[in-house]
Amino acid sequence: MDDSRETLWAPWRIEYVLQEEPDECIFCTKSSSEINDREALVLSRGKHSFVIMNLYPYNNAHLMVSPYQHTADISDIADETHLEMVHFIEEWIEVLTASMNPEGFNIGANFGKVAGAGVEDHYHMHIVPRWSGDTNFMPVLGHTKVLVEGLEETWERLTEKYTEMFGAKDKTD
């Protein structure tokens, strides 16, 4: 068998693959005021929910909107929390459109491991910007995802645009 195929490396993924199940909920930990928002990748905060970048994104600028309340059950979430989360989704679609020009979006939630939930015990919504060709041969055949911008650079770009469009990123008052 001819094994002249090229090897594509994605060394940043090994951290995710080898990590142990965390003892603490990442959403509860990252939303804590003890952690710097930039370090935690938190983009904006409301009274009941917050927006965070996915550390292991499906695509560039893959965001998650999470309630502060720790629950896996969507029916445990109060109406005002759901409403705030939907407002965040609307705002961040505008920000992503203005700053990154995606051609579409996937919006949704995964309930249970079989449905793709990486974090099963804390309800959250995903905002995944999409571009023509973003699912091409690299992830399908090469098992490698190409991200065109680093997480810290994307955090800077998005927080600047959000502040420009909507004012302060902290809307907890």
Image (spheres, rainbow, N blue to C red):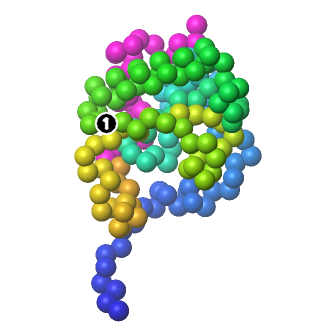
- Quadrant of image for the N terminus: bottom left
Taking the spot 40% from the left edge, 64% from the top edge, the residue there is: 143
Above or below 69: residue 148? below
Q: Which of 48 and 164 is in front in this view?
A: 48
Taking the spot 41% from the left edge, 11% from the top edge, the residue there is: 167
Q: Where is residue 110 in the image (x, y as percent from the top left)?
A: 56, 42
| Residue of label 1 | 104
Q: Is mark 1 on a helix, strand or loop?
A: strand
Residue 161 in view in this figure:
yes
Q: Nearer the viewer, residue 15 or 122?
A: 122
Q: Where is residue 74 in the image (x, y as percent from the top left)?
A: 65, 30
Taking the spot 34% from the left edge, 15% from the top edge, the residue there is: 165
Residue 68 in which image quadrant: top right
Above or below 56: residue 93? above
Magenta range is 148-173
Look at label 1 and name its amino acid: Gly
Q: Where is residue 102 in the image (x, y as percent from the top left)?
A: 28, 36
Q: Position of residue 2 (x, y in %)?
A: 31, 90
Magenta span: predominant SS is: helix
